[in-house]
Image (tube, rainbow, N blue to C red):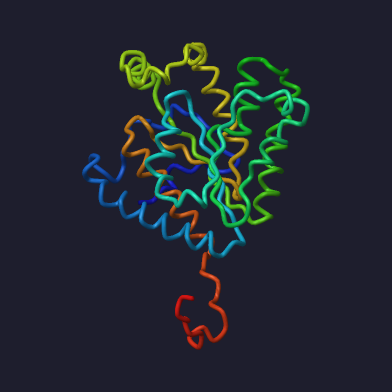
Amino acid sequence: MNVKRFQVKPGSTVHLEAFDPDATPGFKDKQDAADDLAGNLAKLAALQEKLYAQGTQALLVVLQGMDTSGKDGAIEHVMGAFNPQGVQITAFKVPTSEELAHDYLWRIHKAAPPRGMVGIFNRSHYEDVLVVRVAKLAPKKVWSKRFEHINEFEKMLSDSGVRIVKLFLHISAEEQARRLTERRETPEKQWKFNPGDLKARAQWSLYQRAYEDALGRCATPWAPWFVVPSNRKWYRNMVVSQVLVDALEGMDLEFPPAVENISTFEIPPAG
């Protein structure tokens, strides 16, 4: 599966209307993709073991999207293939008083994955050019400078051995309405229903424009953005898994060499 079709070209102007959230190129349906997805999940487990053993690089996965776009689902159904001891998941919520006392990237840098680990950001530093912009928590002269800050921050992480992959889970307004309704009416899903999500929905077009700017201005060779069609959850999982496989395979991961003369070591009887 070639995921280059979903990658945002650095320096381009993004129009989300040009990306079909219903698209499933390469596969007819969930069953058609099942074997490829299973193969990718097996690859992710094997590649992560090498990443962990090598201990010289890290992978950072940034998940962004409108409410109900499937960030939690992607973590569960794709990144669940990773060994939990090698994964660090951070969900960025409203900043605490301590976080607000520092620059906006302080809490992000603290959560960057150490070498050997996979770091997953459920929302991220991009909230500071999305929510902050739409909700008018800071004036344009403040948030507009942050695109450059973010690019330089991600370049620094990349130069330090962190491979960065950024995934925008793209759903339609109609699909979001269906999912919100399902949450409201399904008892075991009602705990996920947040009336605050309805306010963001009412600002859908403003968020779409904010995302377009973030995707276009922060798509770089060292931290690429992918627009993942996510109306169909199975296809979202397929694309996310392939992007992660490609990223890890591009990191030249190898197991460290064995101790010298390993075959000469005899295993003593237990004492």
Residue that appears at 57% across and 48% down:
164
- Please identify the quarter of the rendering in which residue 183 is found: top left
Residue 158 position, x and y percent, is 65, 52
Residue that appears at 68% across and 17% down:
137
In the image, residue 258 above or below residue 100: below
- Please identify the quarter of the rendering in which residue 76 is found: top left
- Please identify the quarter of the rendering in which residue 161 is found: bottom right
Residue that appears at 43% across and 45% down:
79
Residue 102 position, x and y percent, is 77, 30
Residue 208 position, x and y percent, is 51, 23
In the image, residue 176 above or below residue 73: above
In this rendered view, identify the residue nearer to me: 118 or 84: 84
The residue at the far front in this view is 271
Residue 210 position, x and y percent, is 58, 24
In the image, residue 56 above or below residue 179: below
Side of 92 relative to 180 (left or right): right
In this rendered view, identify the residue nearer to me: 44 or 164: 44
Q: Number of marks in the image?
A: 0
